């Protein structure tokens, strides 16, 4: 039986700062901070050095905690928590510390190795992680989970304030194991007990509608550009392709090099985007020479609110060079780049630069506005309607 659910809004800034303070305290359990700093902080600085800091006030907090806390203290757990809190306190939602298990799962996700799951695509929408769509013939869709559902609890533990990555990892598991998912739909809680199945999650594929090629890219894996180029080079002439629809909806990004390689199908030795790091100097990322098989092919790019990062690089460049018409809804607006740093105890995903479109436009926080706006509602998705794709097919270029 479903029960009513009261919306719980979380202040991101407050949650980050409050959580960080609690987590950082744990670093002093059974440890001297100065010894710990010598072990941990060099991994956060490529030079292997770190600025001298006065941590005495935190020593004082630890001393009071250690002397007065009535309960067992798990040193290892608090140290891991302290590392996360230290990074979270920066206030950048894209800079994250991951322990070894989380780092392994993250790297697997970049390559589509999601293992067993329930077959849903999720993303942050309207301050909550929601189901964007259910994959065909997978457990969630069969059980009645719908697009627009808010992910509220997993195995009866509230996760509505957790990140998309954290929720995704909790939904994954061994094939055949069960997971209880509680969602919120129209203010009502609905629970489903689902058996995980192995999910086939390719990064790119091509469908055809007459002389139109529909290229769908779900993420930018390291070889996504190569996959698409091979598909296009084989079928472009054989199928007499006159138009391309590039579907980047719900594509949260991935490897930037793969995005540049994909752009090389339209842009011959052109600037794909501009990178600007801490030193303030600009670095141009240039597409490949002699690979622009689609440079003269009319193209429509489908985008929406979860088109982000590397997929926005592609959309922004094609728009700036007038190589495509963008159709759909405004993109997410993630104009920053992360570098993965392998640490002895895990991984740091840290923001190291901002990027700009070839014309010098920043999209961070603003997103890219489509040339033609067409909405796709959750009801459309649940009814298997796609007005955006239909509009793209009809668009005269």
Image (cartoon, rainbow, N blue to C red):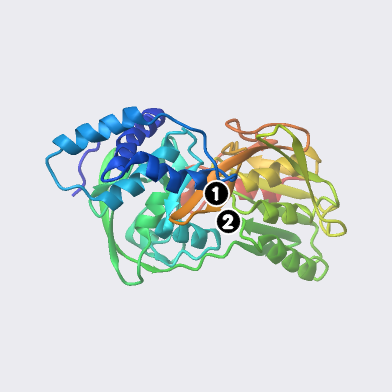
Tell me, for residue 8, which label it has, or none. none
Whether residue 284 is visible here, answered yes or no, is: yes
Name which of mark 2 and mark 1 comes first in the sequence. Answer: 2
User: In the rendering, at what x and y percent does residue 362 appear?
Assistant: 67, 32
**Pointers 2 and 1 in contact (CB under 8 A)?**
yes
Looking at the rendering, which quadrant does residue 29 occupy? top left
Crowd rating for badge 1 (residues with CA inside 10 Å; few <14, some 14–19, many 20+): many
Residues 246 and 30: in front is 30
Residues 276 and 26: in front is 26
Q: Residue at x 42, y 58 (%)?
A: 100
Q: Residue at x 42, y 34 (%)?
A: 89
Which quadrant would the C terminus be assigned to in this image? top right
- C-alpha gap between disc 2 and disc 1: 7 Å
Q: Residue at x 50, y 68 (%)?
A: 200
Above or below, 12 relative to 1: above
Tell me, for residue 218, which label it has, or none. 2
The residue that mark 1 highlights is 250
Crowd rating for badge 2 (residues with CA inside 10 Å; few <14, some 14–19, many 20+): many
- 353 on left or right of 281: left
């Amino acid at each position: 039986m479903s029960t009513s659910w009261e919306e719980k809004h979380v202040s991101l800034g407050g949650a980050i700062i409050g959580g960080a303070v609690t987590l950082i305290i744990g670093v002093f359990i059974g440890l001297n901070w100065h010894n710990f700093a010598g072990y941990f902080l060099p991994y956060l600085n490529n030079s292997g050095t770190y600025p001298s800091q006065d941590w005495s006030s935190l020593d004082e907090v630890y001393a009071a905690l250690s002397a007065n806390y009535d309960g067992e203290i798990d040193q290892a757990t608090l140290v891991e928590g302290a590392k996360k809190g230290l990074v979270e306190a920066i206030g950048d939602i894209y800079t994250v510390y991951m322990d070894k298990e989380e780092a392994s799962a993250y790297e697997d996700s970049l390559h589509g190795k999601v293992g067993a799951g329930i077959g849903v695509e999720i993303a942050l929408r309207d301050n909550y992680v929601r189901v964007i769509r259910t994959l065909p013939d997978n457990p969630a869709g069969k059980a009645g989970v719908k697009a627009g559902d808010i992910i509220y609890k997993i195995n009866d533990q509230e996760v509505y304030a957790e990140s998309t990555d954290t929720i995704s990892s909790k939904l994954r598991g061994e094939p055949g194991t069960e997971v209880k998912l509680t969602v919120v739909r129209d203010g009502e809680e609905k629970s489903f007990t689902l058996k995980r199945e192995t999910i086939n999650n390719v990064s790119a594929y091509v469908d055809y509608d007459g002389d139109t090629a529909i290229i769908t890219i779900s993420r930018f894996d390291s070889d996504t550009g190569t996959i698409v180029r091979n598909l296009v080079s084989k079928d472009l002439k054989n199928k007499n392709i006159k138009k391309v629809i590039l579907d980047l909806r719900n594509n949260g990004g991935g490897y930037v090099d793969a995005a540049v390689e994909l752009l090389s199908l339209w842009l011959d030795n052109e600037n794909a985007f501009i990178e600007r790091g801490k030193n303030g100097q600009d670095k141009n990322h240039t597409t490949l020479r002699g690979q622009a098989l689609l440079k003269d092919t009319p193209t429509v790019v489908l985008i929406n609110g979860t088109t982000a990062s590397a997929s926005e690089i592609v959309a922004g460049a094609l728009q700036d060079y007038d190589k495509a018409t963008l159709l759909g809804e405004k993109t997410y607006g993630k104009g920053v780049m992360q570098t993965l740093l392998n640490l002895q105890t895990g991984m740091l995903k840290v923001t190291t630069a901002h990027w700009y479109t070839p014309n010098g436009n920043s999209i961070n926080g603003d997103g890219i506005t489509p040339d033609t706006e067409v909405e796709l509602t959750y009801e459309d998705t649940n009814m298997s309607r796609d007005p955006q794709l239909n509009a793209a097919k009809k668009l005269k270029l």
